[in-house]
């Protein structure tokens, strides 16, 4: 972080080659392992094609809907007050919500058993579009925890 009045500029990756979308580019970068971007692109593009066929929309729209459905609105943060630690519910910003949604979608696709990564990612995206699946369950669990700790909302900073 800069000292004084300096401002941190948020870096936005260039849009991807096929759909000219920043969301798809971020998704590819998040999926990429060990710098193998071409492999990640191949997996994401094929998974988006499979997803689009199953939900009857264009691939970019399907990804947007899946990320939007998975993004959390509330989350809990630990806050230490007088020797006790409270889970304080806080609202999630749009960027943070989209980042968490992408991370959860990819993690739950990797955790699925069998099949290729393309098929696992496609089925996770289809589930997210329809409002089910492991990533949606994770969002719902986070919302439940925030709701349960609503009494500590006054500790928000």
Image (tube, rainbow, N blue to C red):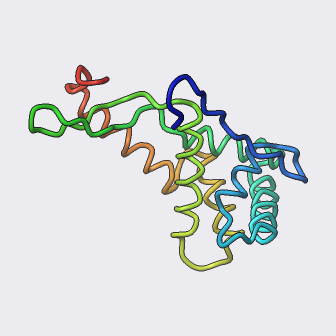
Identify whether 87 is placed above or below 44: above
Q: Quadrant of the C terminus?
A: top left
Left or right? Give the position of 60 relative to 124. right
**Residue at the spot x=76%, y=46% of the render?**
13
The mark tally for this picture is 0
In the rendered image, residue 31, in percent from the top left (x then y), is placed at 66, 62
Is 143 rendered above or below residue 49? above
Residue depicted at x 10% and y 32%: 82
* Displayed quadrant of residue 110: bottom right
Residue at the front extreme, as displayed: 4
Q: Residue at x 64, y 68 (%)?
A: 120
Percent from the top left, x then y, of residue 49? 82, 58
Q: Residue furthest left?
A: 83
Q: Residue furthest right?
A: 18
Q: Nearer the viewer, residue 52 or 24?
A: 24
Q: Left or right? Give the position of 86 relative to 129.
A: left
- What residue appears at the point 51 percent right and 38 percent down from the top-left corner? 1
Left or right side of 121 for 43: right
> Nearest the camera: 121 or 12?
12
Quadrant housing residue 38:
bottom right
Residue 17 x, y percent position in the rendering: 90, 53
């Amino acid at each position: 972080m800069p000292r004084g009045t300096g401002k941190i500029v948020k870096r936005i990756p260039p849009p991807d080659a096929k759909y000219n979308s920043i969301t798809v580019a971020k998704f590819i970068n998040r999926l990429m392992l060990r710098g193998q971007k071409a492999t990640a692109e191949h997996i994401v593009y094929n998974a988006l094609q499979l997803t689009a066929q199953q939900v009857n929309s264009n691939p970019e729209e399907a990804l947007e809907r899946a990320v939007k459905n998975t993004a959390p609105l509330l989350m809990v943060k630990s806050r230490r007050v007088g020797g006790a630690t409270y889970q304080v519910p806080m609202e999630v910003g749009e960027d943070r919500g989209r980042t968490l949604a992408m991370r959860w979608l990819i993690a739950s696709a990797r955790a699925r058993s069998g099949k290729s990564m393309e098929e696992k990612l496609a089925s996770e995206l289809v589930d997210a579009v329809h409002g089910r699946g492991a990533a949606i369950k994770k969002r719902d669990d986070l919302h439940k925890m925030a709701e349960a700790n609503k009494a500590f909302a006054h500790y928000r900073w």
